[in-house]
């Protein structure tokens, strides 16, 4: 008897590696997940930086789009540090992350709060406000990396 097409498609989808294991159930996947989130944070941030520096012309709509993305993206990496085995999954996080997890997580929350402030500044369409909020937002990166990233 022929199998229904849908079943065949589902079975073949589920058996490909992309669908085997979710982003958070395996330590290695959690490392990939948080690194991918950080990469997207970096790209969205760099685009705003380029506009503020005048490397590309300032576009308030585009700043708003990037700030909206950052408001979500900056909430993503942190839970991928606390899945079972996350510490052994590889990557560039120092052991200090898990020794001072509450400090680390509150720095993560601060980044997300500052991203919301950046989004509010972007909504105001006032470039001076954006510049100020961007400065506060950007200071979080190096401060945390100095303590917690190899
Ligand atoms: C609360 C701490 C913290 C903050 C704040 C933080 N980072 Fe990170 N970041 C880390 C840690 C830890 C890693 C290493 C993750 C890993 O390899 O598992 C990392 C890794 C990265 C990476 C490398 C990802 C890869 O592909 O390996 C980039 C890029 C990055 N961060 C960008 C940023 C930017 C830009 C900001 C600020 C907007 C920022 N981070 C804010 C902790 C932080």
Image (cartoon, rainbow, N blue to C red):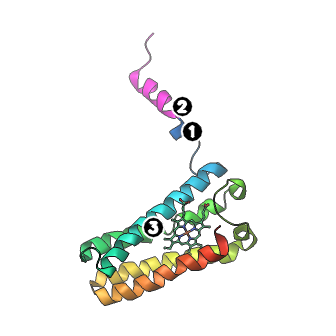
Label 2 crowd bin: few (<14), some (14–19), many (20+), radius 10 Å: few
CB of mark 2 within 8 Å of CB of mark 3? no
Residue shown at 47% from the left, 79% from the top: 138
How many other residues sit within 10 Å of disc 3, few (<14), some (14-19) or many (≥20)?
Answer: few
Earlier along the polypeptide chain: callout 1 or callout 2? 2
SS assignment for the magenta stretch, majority: helix
Q: Nearer the viewer, residue 4 or 124?
A: 124
Residue under label 2, please give it.
15
Q: Which residue is mark 1?
A: 20
Residue range in magenta is 1-16
Judged by depth in the image, the label closer to the viewer, 2 or 3, is 3
User: Who is closer to the viewer here, 42 or 9?
Assistant: 42
Q: How far is mark 3 from mark 1, CA to CA?
A: 28 Å
Residue 52 covered by magenta stretch: no
Residue 118: name its quadrant.
bottom left
The residue where tag 3 is placed is 42
> Does the Cβ of the disc 3 residue fall within 8 Å of ligand 1?
yes
């Amino acid at each position: 008897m022929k199998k229904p097409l849908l079943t065949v498609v589902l079975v073949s989808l589920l058996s490909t590696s992309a669908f085997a294991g979710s982003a958070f159930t395996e330590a290695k996947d959690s490392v990939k997940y948080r690194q991918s989130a950080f990469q997207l944070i970096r790209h969205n941030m760099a685009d705003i930086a380029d506009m503020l520096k005048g490397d590309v012309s300032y576009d308030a709509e585009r700043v708003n789009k990037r700030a909206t993305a950052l408001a979500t993206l900056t909430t993503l990496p942190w839970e991928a540090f606390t899945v079972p085995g996350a510490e052994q999954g590889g990557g560039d996080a120092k052991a200090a992350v898990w020794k001072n997890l509450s400090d680390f997580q509150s720095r993560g929350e601060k980044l997300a709060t500052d991203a919301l402030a950046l989004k509010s500044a972007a909504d105001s369409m006032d470039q001076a406000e954006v510049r100020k909020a961007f400065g506060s937002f950007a200071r979080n990166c190096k401060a945390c990396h100095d303590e917690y990233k190899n």
